[in-house]
């Protein structure tokens, strides 16, 4: 029977947002995403990039087990550096911090290897990713939250000219932190995200402190959603 690695809910969501001729998964580790992308026909060919030797070895074993050595190529290296300009149609990077992912995307952009589409999943606030995209000329095409140990943000960006209309008519600080599409659709997991942010920043907030700006963004988001601080208590663990 063909080996089919099982993806968790966050990687299933990332998978559902990718369709390309040639795709690169950065920080591929177990190579579960490239294997399933090829097996489901969502991509024709995939390049898995991995910085470290031990996960790269695991990726090689997994790809061999799936019998996909002809369609999945594994390369050791940092971010998009092992890719040539124009070599892939899209990239993914998952399971890391937003700042790390944004740094990799930006270095790839400067090096000419970043394609027009990126699908990412970070383990913390996506503020750094949304801010990077606005600066770098990538529009937010899709975003969602996936339930897990915490609500995992999954975002897809597409290269486009001009200001991203996703942020039109929204309070910017709140939208950059909590997501323009998530705010517009009143995403059900936003309550947990906002409760967590409120619990973290409210005790430390005072005029002139960075925690005050973060708390103000939470309050802006609540006002946009028509929720109150009391509405957040049901989301606390
Ligand atoms: C936490 S694992 C996530 C694995 C997989 N992407 C997932 O979401 O399940 C992060 C992986 O990214 C690799 N990694 C970290 N920084 C990297 C970089 N700059 N370039 C390539 N790989 C990197 C690590 O070695 C590790 O295998």
Image: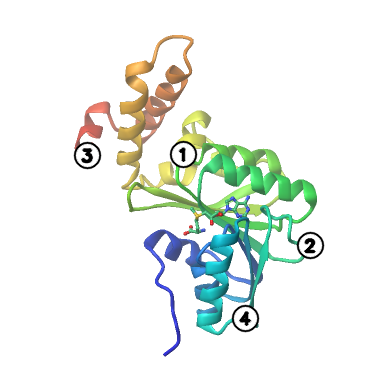
> How far separated are the C-alphas under marks 2 and 3?
46 Å
Which badge, 2 or 3, is on the more N-terminal residue?
2
**Residue at the spot 55% in from the left edge and 61% down from the top edge:** 54
> How far separated are the C-alphas under marks 4 and 1?
35 Å
Please give the residue where the numbered disc 4 appears in the rendered image: 69
Which badge, 3 or 1, is on the more N-terminal residue?
1
Which badge, 3 or 4, is on the more N-terminal residue?
4
Which of pointers 2 and 1 indicates the residue nearer the eye? 2
> How far separated are the C-alphas under marks 2 and 4?
20 Å
Circle 3 SS class: loop
Residue 27 visible to the viewer: yes
What quarter of the picture does the C terminus occupy? top left
Disc 1 residue lies near ligand 1 with CB under 8 A: no
Q: Which mark is residue 237?
A: 3
Judged from the image, the quadrant occupied by ligand 1 is: bottom right
> How far separated are the C-alphas under marks 3 and 1?
19 Å
Crowd rating for badge 3 (residues with CA inside 10 Å; few <14, some 14–19, many 20+) = few
Residue 102 place in picture, x, y as percent: 61, 43
**Residue at the spot 79% in from the left edge and 50% down from the top edge:** 111
Residue 41 visible to the viewer: no
Q: Residue 41's quadrant in the figure? A: bottom right
In the image, taking residue 140 as reference, residue 210 lies left or right, namely left
Residue 76 place in picture, x, y as percent: 67, 61
Which of pointers 4 and 1 indicates the residue nearer the eye? 4
In the image, taking residue 202 as reference, residue 60 lies left or right, namely right
Crowd rating for badge 2 (residues with CA inside 10 Å; few <14, some 14–19, many 20+) = few
Please give the residue where the numbered disc 2 appears in the rendered image: 84
Residue 118 place in picture, x, y as percent: 61, 56
Which badge, 2 or 4, is on the more N-terminal residue?
4
Contact check, label 3 and label 4, Cβ < 8 Å: no
Look at the picture and state if 227 lies above or below 82: above
């Amino acid at each position: 029977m063909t080996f089919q690695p099982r993806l968790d809910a966050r990687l299933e969501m990332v998978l559902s947002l990718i369709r390309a001729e040639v795709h690169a998964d950065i920080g591929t580790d177990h190579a579960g995403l490239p294997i399933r992308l090829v097996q489901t026909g969502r991509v024709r060919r995939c390049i898995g990039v991995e910085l470290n030797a031990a996960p790269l070895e695991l990726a090689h074993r997994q790809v061999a087990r799936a019998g996909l050595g002809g369609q999945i190529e594994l390369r050791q290296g940092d971010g998009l550096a092992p890719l040539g300009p124009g070599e892939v149609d899209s990239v993914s990077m998952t399971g890391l911090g937003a700042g790390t992912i944004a740094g990799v995307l930006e270095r790839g952009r400067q090096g000419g290897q970043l394609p027009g589409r990126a699908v990412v999943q970070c383990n913390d606030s996506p503020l750094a990713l949304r801010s990077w995209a606005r600066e770098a000329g990538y529009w937010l095409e899709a975003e969602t939250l996936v339930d897990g140990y915490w609500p995992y943000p999954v975002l897809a960006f597409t290269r486009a000219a001009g200001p991203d209309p996703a942020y039109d008519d929204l309070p910017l600080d709140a939208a950059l932190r909590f997501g323009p599409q998530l705010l517009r659709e009143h995403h059900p997991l936003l309550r947990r995200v906002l409760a967590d942010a409120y619990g973290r920043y409210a005790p430390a907030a005072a005029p002139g402190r960075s925690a005050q700006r973060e708390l103000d963004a939470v309050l802006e988001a609540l006002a946009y959603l028509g929720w109150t601080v009391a509405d957040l208590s049901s989301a606390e663990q």
